[in-house]
Image: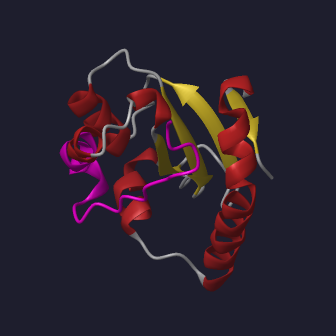
């Protein structure tokens, strides 16, 4: 008899761009299949607070996803929920932008999105395999 309603939440004590080894270790320790893993990450290509669900193998330039893929092996499809942080006007400002603090309004939009994700998480879990490649929650 398997455990069907159990979830683990891993919040690595590392920077996102080097979190892959701790995620891989958790998968191994708790015997979690890569296809059952769900990664939450920020997304420049979404407006602040927008949410997108995706099954995929690529990193789309995201250094954290790149490091996860490096550690779990390329070619592995895994689920992810992207939370939009918006994009600066100039490409040269991206590093500073992603490391900067959110405004009060931006923070509230992101908190509302996280609440929506939590509210819908059980439904997402039940229907993961039926989700299309990109699906918005908002």
Give, as a single range, the part of the protein colored magenta: 1-24
Q: Main secondary structure of the magenta part?
A: loop
Above or below residue 128? Residue 52 is: below
Residue placed furthest toward the bottom:
104
Picture coordinates of residue 92, whole percent (x, y): 38, 49
Q: Please report the residue visible at 49 percent of the width from the left and 37 percent of the height from the top.
A: 2
Decide if residue 124 is on the left or right side of residue 103. right
Q: How many marks?
A: 0
Residue 70, magenta (yes or no): no
Q: Please report the residue visible at 77 percent of the width from the left and 48 percent of the height from the top.
A: 137
Q: Quadrant of residue 100?
A: bottom left
Q: Quadrant of residue 117?
A: bottom right
Q: Kindly tell me whether residue 132 is visible in this rendering.
A: no
Q: Please report the residue visible at 53 percent of the width from the left and 55 percent of the height from the top.
A: 88
Q: Kindly tell me whether residue 2 is visible in this rendering.
A: yes
Nearest the viewer among 103 and 67 is: 67
Decide if residue 67 is on the left or right side of residue 50. left
Nearest the viewer among 110 and 99 is: 110
Picture coordinates of residue 52, whole percent (x, y): 67, 43
Nearest the viewer among 56 and 30 is: 30
Picture coordinates of residue 25, whole percent (x, y): 20, 44
């Amino acid at each position: 008899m398997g455990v069907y309603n159990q979830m683990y939440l891993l919040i690595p004590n590392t920077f996102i761009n080097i979190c892959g080894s701790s995620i891989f270790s958790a998968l191994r320790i708790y015997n979690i299949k890569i296809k059952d893993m769900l990664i939450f990450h920020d997304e420049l290509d979404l407006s602040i607070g927008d949410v997108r669900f995706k099954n995929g193998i690529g990193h789309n330039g995201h250094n954290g996803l790149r490091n996860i893929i490096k550690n779990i092996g390329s070619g592995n499809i895994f689920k992810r929920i992207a939370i939009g942080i918006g994009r600066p006007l100039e490409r040269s400002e991206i590093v500073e932008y992603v490391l900067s603090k959110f405004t009060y309004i931006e923070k509230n939009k992101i908190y509302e999105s996280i609440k929506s994700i939590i509210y819908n998480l059980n439904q997402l879990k039940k229907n993961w395999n039926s989700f299309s490649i990109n699906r918005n929650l908002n």
